[in-house]
Amino acid sequence: MGSFRPVFYVTFRSLIATMFPRYRRSDPQSKRRVILYALLFAYVFITIVGGEAALFYSLAKSLGPAGYGWLYFALVGALVIALCIVGELFLTHAQLFAAKDNEQLLSLPVRPGVVLFARIASLLVLDYIFTLIVAAPAAVMWIAANSIGAAGAVFLVLAVIMLPLPAMGVSILIAWILSAVFSRLRGSNILKLLVYLLFFAAYFYVVSNLNEYIRTLISRGAEIAEAFRRGAFPLYHLGLAVTEGDAVSFFIFAVCALAPFVIMTALLSSRFLKIATTNRGARKVAYRQKRLKASGARTAFVKKELRLFFSIPAYILNGGLGALFSIVVAVLLVVRRDIVFQMFQTSPDALPFGAPTVAALMLCLFSALSLVSAASVSIEGNTLWIARSLPVSTYDILLAKVASHSLVCGVPTLIGAIICAVAFGSGIIGLLALIITPLALVVTMGFAGVVINLRHPRLDWVNPVQPVKQGAAVLISMLAGAALILVPGMLYVFLLHRIMDVDFMIFLTGVVYIGISILLAMHLKDKGARLYEGLGG
């Protein structure tokens, strides 16, 4: 126990450092940043819990009087397990199978099992947070709509303690499989990206169809209840234990909950030392003689930025997802327009303009969500000095970051615009609005991201995911992109809709974006270059 606590403290702090930003105490703006993130976290937390409370209350009022109270708690258990698996799957992979500090921890006078269980315990802490986010509003809404006995209340508390354990067992199994696959396949970064996208698509699909699932659940409760009895009997017994105070059912659930966790922990414990000390090294590549190709400084830096971007799956997912959506939504607008309007909970008849205008607005929206350049300075980390030591203009280095952002995000945006232009057709102003404005916004976001990142860099990261997902520059760039969309939209709705057509307004906004890009380029050449030269030393 004496050696477990310090190892757990180190592993838990490392885990938190990969999830949340940290700032030096000497930073005079750190308190304001902490307050900003706290307010943002509080807003997100209240929004999520409020939505869950409304959902659970409607289910409790429908399932309780119908005699399917056990199904209510079975669904809550399923949601908790699913959230824990999805929320921590890649963290489990990173902490147990791809940790960078395994050798350092194993060099300490502690047993390998202590390191393993400290890592699992740190992951379980986050699982319990996820569990409470779902279970607490579910329990409150059930009590508000129905009643619960003393034995059921005790079993509910014990169930909340046990629910993260099977989720952790399943997460360990999946992470182990992914580790084996990633270590043996070429192009594993692309595979990781595909796995990320698969989980994201599944989550988005479930959320977008949640109301339909609730209606189906209420209308076909008996069939779904029978499916739970047969296919998910541990959750069925969980529901019986809570609603009826059945001790035998709780025992069955407890055994089923503990079994996967105990089995996977035992298996991993027997192999952990080998996993932690295996150095897979780099792939061996056969040398082939090729003609050396020389390129200019800007081209070389653009290639470097592109290689860095495509080497980090989290960077691709968080920075370039908007660009990918530009093509996906363009194809959907042509093939299945109803799906797009369903995602935004509206219909084509409710809009005062046609499909080409909708396409232009959506392409602008996804251009604003493209945040490649917002982490392009921070991602250099402790290698920043390499670029600064070269006999290359600082402005060329910064322009390369803008150019790589424009290529990564601009090419998919252009493809999406061409697809929509060919499919829908439009007048000359509508065509200019469809093509020029989204591309102009891509370039503007490229300049804005670099400018913002120069003012809010994060170079002391230990994992490249940190500046990509948690950097202040990414958040500020996201808000700036929202402002670039909302401000022209509000001006048109409240002031300009009577004197100009919407397509002309979109085109005019594109001209404004071009002007903003020119101003940002001038700022980057002067003050931005000085900020870059002063970083890291």
Image: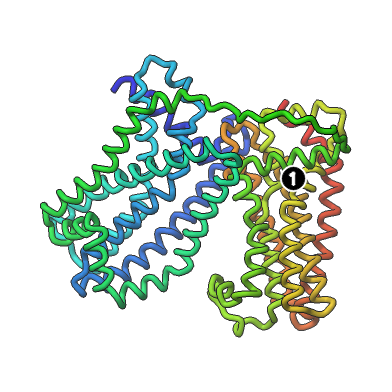
Asked if residue 536 shows in the view, the reply is yes
252 lies left or right of 466: left
Q: Residue furthest top?
A: 109
For image coordinates 31% across by 35% down, the residue present is 265
For the N terminus, the quadrant is: top left
Judging depth in this view, the residue of 20 and 69 nearest the camera is 69
Residue depicted at 61% across the width and 41% down the height: 187
The reply, left or right, for residue 486 in relation to residue 119 is right
Q: What type is the residue that disc 1 sits on? A: Val
Q: Position of residue 502 (x, y in %)?
A: 75, 77
Q: Is residue 494 visible?
A: no
The figure's colour scheme reads rainbow
Q: Position of residue 5 (x, y in %)?
A: 34, 25
Residue 314 in which image quadrant: top right
The residue positioned 54% from the left and 54% from the top of the image is 197
Q: Quadrant of residue 457?
A: top right
Q: Position of residue 252 (x, y in %)?
A: 16, 50
The residue that appears at 36% across and 67% down in the rendered structure is: 55
Q: Residues within 10 Å of mark 1 (few under 14, many from 20)?
A: many
Task: Please name the residue that numbered disc 1 is placed on.
Answer: 450
Where residue 136 sits in the image (x, y, percent)?
Answer: 31, 55
Is residue 237 positioned above or below 273 on the image? below
